[in-house]
Amino acid sequence: MKRNHVNGLIAVVMLFASAALVAEQPKTVTLKKGTVIRVALAAPVTSENAKVNDIVPVKALDDVTVDGVVVIAKDATGTAHVSSVEKKGKWGKAGGIEVTVDFVKAVDGNNVGLTHAVVTQGGGGMSTGAMMMGLSGAFKKGKQAAIPANDAINGYVDADCAIAVSDAPR
């Protein structure tokens, strides 16, 4: 009789343990390639002090959901880099800067790569006013280019991404 109680107890413990394992398995959803993710630079960037390949922090501007579940949370962090810099120059030549967004973090901690997420500001040749001023135009300096923080940048998911999520919609 004692043996039946022990076997019954073992069966109950195994049942609860397997139920706990099943409950702990996260649901996986797929964030599709081409999904638009709105991000913004977390800090301004200028042609005056930026260098090519400088890392620039970004943040997601909105929750992104799949099947009613958040896969990228608003304010999720990510990374961009400075891809091009032109310093301001003589003859009224304006500075220029280009920043490319690389990724943003999903709720499971994995990076979601973005494509076509580039923002460019300034650049170009000498100003017309400087050319018309003749030799004295050589002393006219152009303006630095600046990309402000918090301006929306549309990026597109670069490949289908499997993201582990909890079952509870947010």
Image (cartoon, rainbow, N blue to C red):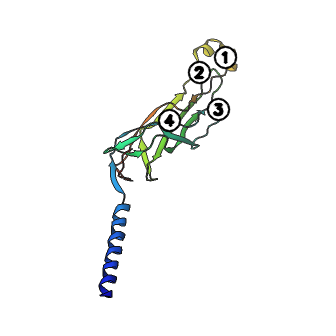
User: Dot 3 corresponds to which residue?
Assistant: 48
In what element is the residue under mark 1?
helix
Identify the image quadrant of the N terminus. Answer: bottom left
Q: Earlier in the sequence, mark 2 or mark 4?
A: 4
Using the numbered discs, state the Cα–Cα distance from disc 2 to disc 4 in whole angstroms.
30 Å
* Residue 34: image location, x then y, percent: 34, 41
**Residue marked by disc 4:** 40
Residue denoted by label 1: 137
Instruction: Classify 154 as above or below 66.
Output: above
32 or 143: which is nearer to us?
32
Q: Position of residue 39 (x, y in %)?
A: 47, 37
Quarter the C terminus occupies? top left
Q: Residues within 10 Å of mark 4 (few under 14, many from 20)?
A: many
Give the distance between the C-alpha atoms of the residues marked 2 and 1, in whole angstroms: 9 Å
Q: Is disc 2 placed on a helix, strand or loop?
A: loop
Spatial separation of the CA atoms under disc 3 and disc 2: 17 Å
In this image, 77 relative to 94: left or right?
left
Which residue corresponds to the image point at 33% horizontal and 64% vertical from the top-left? 22
Circle 2 sits on which residue?
Answer: 126
In the rendered view, would you say 1 is above or below 21? below
Q: Nearer the viewer, mark 4 or mark 1?
A: 4
